[in-house]
Image (tube, coloured by chain):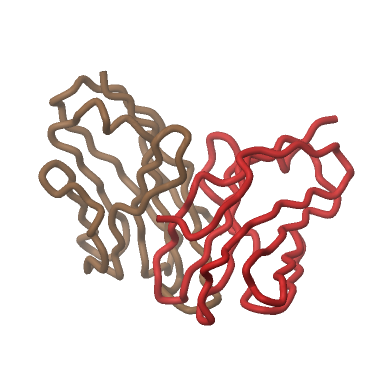
Chain colours: A brown, B red
Amino acid sequence: EAGVAQSPRYKIIEKRQSVAFWCNPISGHATLYWYQQILGQGPKLLIQFQNNGVVDDSQLPKDRFSAERLKGVDSTLKIQPAKLEDSAVYLCASSLVSHGPIYEQYFGPGTRLTVT
Amino acid sequence: DAKTTQPTSMDCAEGRAANLPCNHSTISGNEYVYWYRQIHSQGPQYIIHGLKNNETNEMASLIITEDRKSSTLILPHATLRDTAVYYCIVREYTDKLIFGTGTRLQVFP
């Protein structure tokens, strides 16, 4: 079974530039998540999709971050304009269901973003 | 905020059991205990979860105290590949995962 795919793996941009990350979840997984992981911290949920609808985006800085999952499969996370504090690893995850005790999220390898 | 407290780091000799503790003194009756780990430069990986009873799978064992205020993840025979950050997470099954800073386990030869 193919895992969660993400690209690019690394990205270096200057502040005020824009950047986009792509994620392809595991086939059949209805729920997709984007996390931000700052160095030395655990991942923080930015946004959760159920199919192509947003379930939770309470932690997404909406003035500069946007995400979409138009066809309910792959997803794009965009930052515009980037700030120095956006330097982090951006992780995508997917799960078969969004709740229940048997609840396992599968994570991709992440995109490491450096803003200079 | 994370509802768990874990030691910042631990060491373990290869081949020995690694016992990773987690305190969750405010856990409620509907909340499960989950463990994930994150190997360097990879995304987190699910290990195991439990509610009340002890659980075991091919990766690890989870021991939950009777009052459910703490738990221990046991890797019975640690290998160098088990070097990672281990996250203990408490959640109700409708909640999102909230990661703390975890325990950095270093397995040495």
Furthest residue toward left: A63
Across and down, in percent, residue B103 comes to 62, 44
Rendered image quadrant of residue A18: top left
Residue at figure coordinates x 48%, y 42% from the top left:
A109
Furthest residue toward bottom: B29
| B65 and B100: which is toward the camera | B65
Across and down, in percent, residue A26 comes to 45, 60
Image quarter in which the C terminus of chain A is found: top left
| Residue A74, above or below B28 | above
Across and down, in percent, residue B71 comes to 68, 63
Across and down, in percent, residue B29 comes to 53, 81
| B67 and A111: which is toward the camera | B67
Q: Relative to residue B43, is residue A53 drawn left or right?
A: left
| Residue B10, above or below B45 | above
Residue at figure coordinates x 56%, y 46% from the top left:
B102
Image quarter in which the N terminus of chain A is found: bottom right
Figure label count: 0
| B78 and A94: which is toward the camera | B78
Residue at figure coordinates x 38%, y 28% from the top left:
A10
Residue at figure coordinates x 17%, y 49% from the top left:
A66
| Residue B22, above or below A5 | below
Q: Relative to residue B54, is residue A2 drawn left or right?
A: left
| A58 and B46: which is toward the camera | A58
Furthest residue toward right: B15
